[in-house]
Structures are given as structure tokens and as C-alpha cells.
Amino acid sequence: MVIAIDGYSSCGKSTLAKDLAKALGYIFIDSGAMYRAVALYSIQNSINVEDLESFNLDLIKIEFIPLNNQLYIHLNGNDVTSLIRSMEVSNIVSEVASISPVRKYLVKLQQEMGKTGGIVMDGRDIGSVVFPNAQFKFFVTASLEVRAHRRHNELIGKGISVEHEDIVKNLMHRDHIDSTRTDSPLTQLPDAIIIDTTHHTRVSQLREVLQIVTKS
């Protein structure tokens, strides 16, 4: 099967997708990491976001490398798994993801990855654009305060100091751009199964989704 998981930033969809893939013996693909890699490339090479419209995106090589039961993302041969999670990248990734040539380039890569099936992919437009015929489509959400708390804990755990208020502003900014962009906006599809993780634990949200997938 192909399982698509869409939702807002920091709602727990990547954790859910990763855990679900492991439970099913599937491959997990974090599409958001790919957009973050493009954002990081633009920062490292002093490329303005708007200039990505006409940039030769073939110069940006993105790979997922499995190692010791972990999946690492490489940008032009370098491991950038940790670097793409910085606030600097977070502050521009939604703008990068709103650029049509970038979306088309990465959607093509994502569709290639899913040709053989047996994958769980999370993002913003996986069920609507990348895999509209996915056997399962989930839409994950959570309250803004819970999302900010989770994001803050994640960054603190990585040794990144950031104010809680700045995270809230960043999430609101990204929500607005993701939901209102012209190309492939984040949208809740009529056939998507809603998973509200506000009061879920990591274990309980996986249990709920596993029950849906395995009983069908």
C-alpha cells in the first residue's frame, strides 16, 4: 500500500508516519525534509527564495540514506539531517515550498520513490497531489499550543535555544502560507481520515491508525 499522511507543522505527523512505517515494515519518507533541504541549499549558497523560480534545481541532489535503522537525508552528498531542523530553515521553508518549480521538482522525486508501494509518506500535499490514489489518506491536526510545545521540546532536545513565542509565530506564519499558497495548498480532503493528536500520546496515535489500516 501507499499511505499518505498530511497535516500542519509540528502536529506529530512525521512521528506517526515513522512509527506506522516501522510497524508495517514499510519505508518512511519525510517529504518535508526535502523542502527543508532545498531551503538549506538556498541559505548556504546565498540564493534568495524568489530566485529559486528560475534556478536550475537539477543542481540540488537529495537522497534518503538508511543507516542503523535510521533514515538520513543527504544534500549533494552531505548529511544534513540535523541542519535542516534549524529555525533559520524553518523560517523560510514554507516560502520555498510555495514556489511552483520547486514543488514540481520534488513531487516528481516523491512519486518515483513511491512507484513500488510499501511506503508511508508525510507532508502537505501527499494525498491531494503526490499520491491521489493512495489506499489510505490521513489528515493530522493538533492545537496550536500543543504543536508549539512539541516543537519547543524538540529544539531544546537538540540543544537549540529558542523562545516559545517565536515558535508560535513561526507556526502561525507557516500555517497561513501552507494553506493559502496557489500551488498545492494544504487542504483537508473529503476522503481523508482525521487524526487529532492534541490529546494523543505517541503510542495511542499509532494504535488508532494501525487499527484503521489493519482492519480495512
Image (tube, helix red, strand yellow):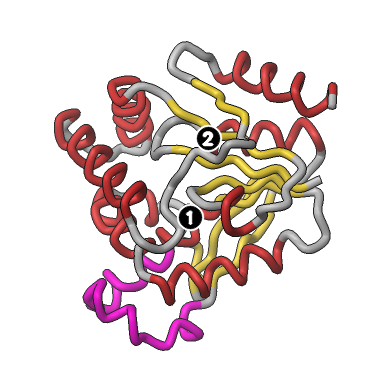
Q: CA distance from mark 1 to mark 2?
A: 13 Å
Of the residues shown, which amino acid type is indicated by label 2? Lys
Does the magenta segment cover residue 131?
Answer: no
Q: Residue farthest to the front?
A: 190
Q: Residue 111 appears at what percent x and percent y?
A: 67, 65
Give the amino acid type for the residue marked by disc 1 in the picture: Ala
Label 2: few (<14), some (14–19) or many (≥20) C-alpha neighbours in 10 Å? many
Q: Is residue 123 left or right of residue 181?
A: right
Mark 1 / mark 2, whichever is N-terminal = 2
Residues drawn in magenta: 37-60
Q: Is residue 43 magenta?
A: yes
The residue positioned 62% from the left and 29% from the top of the image is: 193
Rendered image: mark on residue 199: none
Q: Position of residue 199 (x, y in %)?
A: 46, 11
Residue 146 x, y percent position in the rendering:
34, 20
Q: In this rendered view, identify the residue nearer to me: 156 or 24.
A: 24
For the point 60% across and 19% down, the residue is 205
Quadrant where the C terminus is found in the figure: top right
| 106 to 163, vertically: above or below | below
Residue 52: percent from left, percent from top: 32, 78
Badge nearest the viewer, 1 or 2 = 2
Q: Which residue is mark 1?
A: 33
- Residue 111 position (above or below residue 128): below
Which residue position is annotated with label 2?
13
